[in-house]
Image (cartoon, rainbow, N blue to C red):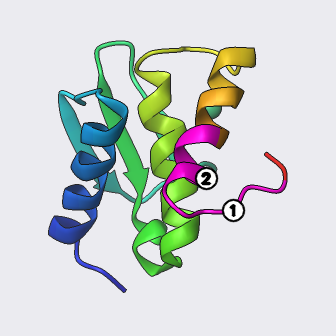
């Protein structure tokens, strides 16, 4: 399990790679989702993610950060998600 501080550091470091800067990052208990993104640029992540492997966290973090640029799961969103993850050593079979 990683700490909230380390997790936020991870999010910001991905943000640098993707060149997006979330306004706020929150970690809290979420029942149905791993994360969400507000239209104002606030990202909320499930506390459960702190228990998940690094690869899993990367998928959720990059997904959510990309929503700061693309609100929907359009073609560009999917291409970039795959690109950023594979460029950083995370093999993506299917999203
Ligand atoms: Zn999404």
Q: Residue at x 73, y 55 (%)?
A: 92
Please tell me which residue lies in front, 13 or 71. Answer: 13
Q: How many marks?
A: 2
SS category of the residue bearing label 2: helix
Tell me the residue that label 2 is attached to.
86
Looking at the image, is 61 positioned above or below residue 9?
above
Taking depth in this image into account, of 38 and 74 the one nearest to the observer is 74
Left or right, residue 53 beside residue 82: left
As for residue 91 lying within the magenta part, the answer is: yes
Circle 1: element type: loop
Q: Position of residue 52 (x, y in %)?
A: 52, 76
Cα distance in 3D space between marks 2 and 1: 5 Å
50, above or below 77, in the image: below
Quarter of the C terminus within the rendering: top right
Residue 22 x %, y %? 24, 30
Name the foreground residue: 7 vs 38.
7
Residue 59 disc label = none
Q: Residue at x 63, y 50 (%)?
A: 32
Q: Is residue 69 visible?
A: yes
Q: As displayed, is residue 95 above or below residue 76? A: below
Left or right: residue 69 compared with residue 95? left
Residue at (58, 66) in percent of width and height:
56
Specify few, some or many for label 2: CA neighbours under 10 Å numbering under 14, 14-19, or 20 or more.
few
Q: Residue furthest right?
A: 94
Do tag 2 and tag 1 residues touch (Cβ < 8 Å)?
yes
Residue appearing at x 24%, y 39% in the figure: 16
Does label 2 or label 1 sit earlier along the sequence?
2
Residue marked by disc 1: 91
Estimate the x, y position of residue 51 in percent, counting from the top left. Answer: 46, 80
Left or right of 27: which side holds 88? Answer: right
Would you say residue 4 sits in the magenta stretch? no
* Magenta region, residue range: 83-93
């Amino acid at each position: 399990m990683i700490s909230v501080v380390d997790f936020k550091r991870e999010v910001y470091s991905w943000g640098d790679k993707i060149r997006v800067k979330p306004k706020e990052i929150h970690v809290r208990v979420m029942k149905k989702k791993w994360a969400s993104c507000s239209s104002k640029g606030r990202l909320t992540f499930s506390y459960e993610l702190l228990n998940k492997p690094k690869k899993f966290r990367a998928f959720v973090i990059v997904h959510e950060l990309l929503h700061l640029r693309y609100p929907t799961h359009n073609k560009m969103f999917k291409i970039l998600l795959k690109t950023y993850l594979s460029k950083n050593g995370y093999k993506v079979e299917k999203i």
